[in-house]
Image (spheres, rainbow, N blue to C red):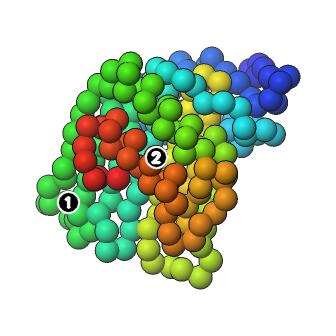
Amino acid sequence: MEVALYDTNRCLELPDFMLALRSTRPARRVLTLVASIVFASACSDTTAPLQLEGRPTILEFSIGGFGAPSRQLELRGDTVIARRRPFNWTSTSPTDSVRVIPSAEQWRAFWSAADAAGVQQWHVQYNAEGIVDGEGWSLSVASRDRAISSWGSNAYPDRNGREHETQRPAEFEAFLNALNVLAGVSGWF
């Protein structure tokens, strides 16, 4: 396997074999996600720009916690799927879900919002010490040239990647709104 390093920003380029693994089969999607995270963790400079348009290779986001509904968004092929489950969800409870194929303009708006939120500056982990209940979130996004994996537990990043415990910064809220717009829903994220 050959991996190319960019001289200008020293981030790893995702190898072609990972792009070939894309599939709707869950095992392959998980393998692709894990491989993306491994390759992203090898980046020595995480400030390379995000793509400006088009759909990513991987887009997965989830958020939820104690006393709150769980919400997930994932990209499968060209379709964005969003799901929302109530806090007390059981296997017999209904799940709200939507499927949408975003337009080129919707993808440009998403990338613009992700850039404005500083997603490219987000660290791998944000964790509020000493809080066991509350809200957790995770983001995995990858394109041909970049992979970002970040998660938090009761802590959220701002545009510069700084951690804010218990309170979501405006930039994080704006990113959540961009997910709502991308999925064609209101107030889910």
Please state which of residues 23 and 170 is positioned toward the viewer in this rendering: 170
Q: In the rendered structure, which amino acid carries the disc numbered 1?
A: Ser
Q: In the rendered structure, which amino acid carries the disc numbered 2?
A: Phe
The residue singled out by tag 2 in the image is 175
SS for dot 1: loop
Q: Quadrant of residue 17?
A: top right
Q: Residue at x 14, y 55 (%)?
A: 94
Classed neighbour count for the residue bearing mark 2: other residues with Cα under 10 Å, few (<14), some (14–19), many (≥20):
many
In the displayed structure, 170 sits above or below 67; it is above
Q: Residue at x 59, y 57 (%)?
A: 157
Q: Indicate the quadrant containing the N terminus: top left, top right, bottom left or bottom right.
A: top right
Classed neighbour count for the residue bearing mark 1: other residues with Cα under 10 Å, few (<14), some (14–19), many (≥20):
few
**Is residue 76 rendered to the left or right of residue 152?**
left
Q: Earlier in the sequence, mark 2 or mark 1?
A: 1
Q: How many marks?
A: 2
**Is residue 164 rendered to the left or right of residue 88?**
right
SS for dot 2: helix
Picture coordinates of residue 108 (x, y %)? Answer: 45, 25
**Is residue 90 rendered to the left or right of residue 126?**
left
The residue singled out by tag 1 in the image is 91
Q: Residue at x 67, y 45 (%)?
A: 121
Q: Is residue 19 visible?
A: yes
Picture coordinates of residue 175 (x, y %)? Answer: 46, 46
Which one is in front in this view, the residue at disc 2 or the one at disc 1?
2
Distance CA(mark 2)–CA(mark 1): 30 Å
Q: Is residue 36 visible?
A: no
Picture coordinates of residue 120 (x, y %)? Answer: 64, 40
Picture coordinates of residue 42 (x, y %)? Answer: 76, 39
Q: Residue at x 57, y 25 (%)?
A: 51
In the displayed structure, 189 sits above or below 58; it is below
